[in-house]
Image (spheres, helix red, strand yellow):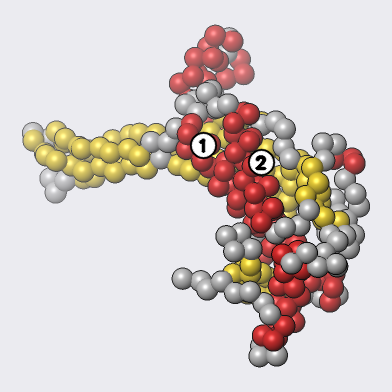
Amino acid sequence: MKKSLLIAPLLVLLLTGCSADWYYAGRFLTKFEYQSKDATEQIYVVLPKSVMHTNSSLNDIAGFMFMTEQEQDSVIASKTSILNILDDSIFLSQFNNAFLFVLSRTRIPIVLVDDPSRLPIPDDNHFTVNVVQFEAEEYLQPGNSGFTTKQGSKFSYDYDLRHFSINAWFELDARDTNDIIYFKNNEIAETFHGTVTSLRQDKATMKTHFDRINVNDAYRLAWNFGIQCATLYVEKMLTEYVCRTKGTNSSYFYYAPSCNCIEEIRSYDEGIKESFEKL
């Protein structure tokens, strides 16, 4: 289990290597915790207001675009289980509330902005995050469970496993990353387990078990995804702050919202692999 650590100035004297990076990042958090006079930074946030629905399974349907509207509706219904009943307002509130909850744990003032064009230019007192696009994606992935007996008889069982993912594109503050779009996604999927119970006269009987997903799982994923994205943003903010303060930074800080503290520190190159993807 990782051990959560708060940084105290005395600890800096005992550490080597990345101790200065760790001190500055920890100091950034504690100054808001204790409402220090130099706690002047703010986070400006543009949250998503709409959800793009994508059913990727339809890409595999030959001639879908040439079907009649009634035929298309029939195919969509056969391939869709979550998107057709997903309530966008609930879905968005799950993500948005979780995202803001994590940011609020830092005690840094949050300013909600409706119009992205009104975001301030990132500087020493302004951090900005804009969720420019938010997508709910559903698709079916074909699967097969098969085996061959010692006598050479082949048995096969075909099935589909449903996947549901959230994809989000961000514009994040950083004076060295202007015009860069960042991407993050998370996914849940069904699983299958089959056990052959008997083989008689070249006929196999299989006991099947599916762990299915539904719309409530999609709502839970939205909440967890909000937690994940906000945590990664705070980690990026800590990295950016150290870079602004020192002029350089070689460390990546893992943030724990539960204690508003730095949970772990690793090299920047190693930690950044788990963060947002640059597009």
Classify residue 132 as left or right of residue 78: right
Secondary structure of the residue carrying numbered label 2: helix
Q: Please, what is the three-letter code of the amino acid marked with disc 1?
A: Ala
Residue at x-position 53% and y-position 12%: 71
Residue 214 percent coordinates (x, y): 44, 32
Q: Is residue 256 visible?
A: no
> What residue is disc 1 on?
218
Q: CA distance from mark 1 to mark 2?
A: 14 Å
Report whether 36 appears left or right of 209.
Answer: right
Note whether 47 is above or below 106 in the view shown: above
Tell which of 191 and 51 is nearer to you: 51
- Nearer the observer, 90 or 168: 90
Residue 15, image x, y percentages = 66, 88
Please tell me whether residue 219 is drawn above or below residue 61 in the rendered image: below
> Which is in the foreground here, disc 1 or disc 2?
2
Q: Which residue is mark 2?
A: 96
For this view, does 222 lie left or right of residue 233?
Answer: left
Mark 2: give few (<14), some (14-19) or many (20+) Cα within 10 Å.
many
One can see residue 75 in this view? yes
What kind of residue is marked 2?
A: Asn
Q: Residue at x 73, y 78 (%)?
A: 23
Mark 1 lies on a secondary structure that is: helix
| 22 over 207 or under it: above or below | below
Which sits in the foreground, 104 or 277?
104
What's the residue at 41%, 40% (across, down)? 190
**Residue at the (49%, 25%) spot, across then down:** 80
Choose between 250 and 80: the one closer to the eye: 250
